[in-house]
Structure formats: C-alpha cells, structure tokens
Image: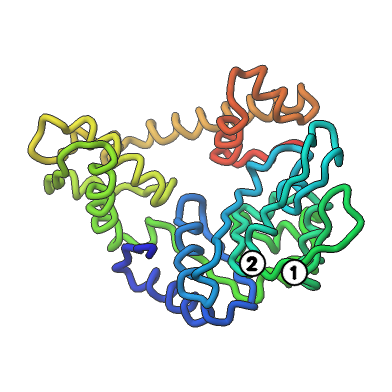
Amino acid sequence: MTKLIVVSELMRAALRKLESFAAFDGLPIHIGGESGTGKELVANWVHERSSRARRNFVPVNCASLPDGLVEAELFGHTRGAFTGATQAREGLIAHADGGTLFLDEVADLPPRAQTALLRALQEKEYRRLGEACLRRSNFRLISASHKNLSEEVDAGRFRRDLFFRLKVVHVELPALRERPADILPLAAHCVRTQSRLLGVAPRGFTREAERRLGQYGWPGNVRELENEVVQALVRAQEAEAIGVEHLSLPSADTSAEGRALGAASRAFERRFLTDSLAAHGGNRTRTARALGLSRQGLYRKLKRLGVRRGP
C-alpha cells in the first residue's frame, strides 16, 4: 500500500476530500498543485482505496509522450498505422481497463488527443490508430497538472468540454512550503527509504540541519526534498549525523544581491531557451540536439523556467 507521510492539517484536509470520493470510481478526479507535490503518489493512494484496487494503476506523463505519437501511445495502433509501426500494439487505455488511468500534465495533451480522450470518457469507447472498429475500456480517470486548466481553456489550448469532464472532483495539493509541519517527517522518511536503496547506514539530522530544512522554501517541493536527502546521505557517510555542511541549501540570510543574481540568471536562461526554440521552429527534438541535451533534459529545463514548449 502507498504510504503518505502527512502531519499538517492542510494536507490532511486534501486527503480527506479525496478519500470521500475514492469509492465513487466512476467519477473523474483532477489533482492540481505545483510540480513535485506528489500528485502521482496521491493518485495511486486514491486508486488503492477504490473498488478498482486489484486492477492496474497506469501512470502516464503526457508531457513526455513522443511527438506525433500521443494518440498511438494512449489508444494503441495497428500494424502499418504509421511509419515504424511494424506490429500492432495495445494502448495505455487498454491496459487501464478495469483499473485507473492517471494522466499527469494533462494540459499538455495535443488537441486531437483531447478529442479522443473526451469520447473515451463519455462513451467508454475508443479506436486504435489505423482501425475502424470501436473498442471498449472501463477505466477510472485521475488527471493532474501543475498548470491552471481554467487559464488553459481561456487561452484556447484546452477543450472546455473536456475541462468540465475532468474536474468533476478537483483537489489542490498544497506546496511543501505551505505545510511546514510535514518537512521534517518527510525528510526522516526519505532517509529511511533512500538509505536502503543506497546501501548506506541511516542517520538523523543535527538541530542546525533540521532548522535549515525547515527554513528553506522548497520550490521543487517533495521531489526536491528527496533529491536533497539523497545527496546529503552520500556526503555524510563518515559522519554520525547529517549536518548543514552536508546540505546544499542556502542559509536563511541569503543576501538580496544573491537572490537578484539568481533571478537574473534564470531570466537569461529562459530567454536563451526561448530563442533556441524559435531558431529551430519550435521543434523540441532539434533544439535539444543543438544544445547537447536529451529531450527529457530539455523538458525539465522548460518546465522549471516556465517556458511554453513548441510542437
């Protein structure tokens, strides 16, 4: 079973609302919140509390689906449906039949895939690419996005009818900085789990390290906290406890000049990526290749800096 470490009342309230709807597994759920707040983990937690718990939980990050193949990945395809389709393949919706399909970053779905998803939700029917006959899949949809879907609808990037279909139940997960009571329990849990994975002895934090963890703003939320703990465990192998010298977090008295320099650096990097995308016609694959990055590396940079991606 999925274990959630929650102390704060703010997060408990969000989970109580989700749990109250978990059993009504015909209702779609949309989970909002910043990147790194644990939306996939919470979606799995909901799935385990539904009547579909014995069937598949199928997580999909819509932002990472290959260009031009989103529909093929979601709905499947026949042999020869497109160049490179050497054999027929079931889609992720078929794998989710009887279970739960979790679409993370659903706002990044292209228009054609949004239309096909709407039909699948309304009729429980879909077509594989290259196939005329309809197939059926009885899945429960949980979607998530760090973007504001209402704003995406107003901007014409997301279907209004799909928006209303997804947000029958909507819960916003609070950012980690909004639930400081959870920071140290989460850090301790990360130490226990990550030390086993790394094969190192678990250790606690000094009081100064705990203070530093509690004072930091955690813009990357729980994901950033997990990464910080992993690095600290590696650095503190010869120490009895994890101290501030093993953390890479800035002190609370970071100067205004330092913050301004960081903001200027991010602005420069944002402009550089925007110009690079424009120079390659918005094509992410060519942009990543030109910058010596993997596609996923480019995705992460674009998301971190809030740059809208090209096609």
Task: Name which residue type carries label 1.
Answer: Leu
**Circle 2 — which element?**
strand
Residue 190's spot in the image, x, y percent? 28, 49
* Mark 1 surroundings: few (<14), some (14-19) or many (≥20) residues within 10 A: many
111 or 193: nearer the viewer = 193
Residue drawn at x 38%, y 73% is 12
Residue drawn at x 75%, y 69% is 121
Residue 128's spot in the image, x, y percent? 81, 53
Residue 120 appears in the figure: yes
| Placement of the C terminus among the 4 image quadrants | top right
Which residue has dot 2 on it? 141
Asked if disc 1 and disc 2 are in contact, CB closer than 8 Å, the reply is yes
Residue 125's spot in the image, x, y percent? 80, 67
Which residue has dot 1 on it? 121
Total numbered labels placed on residues in the image: 2
Residue drawn at x 76%, y 70% is 124
The correct choice, above or below, for 131 with respect to 298 in the image is below
Disc on the earlier residue, 1 or 2: 1
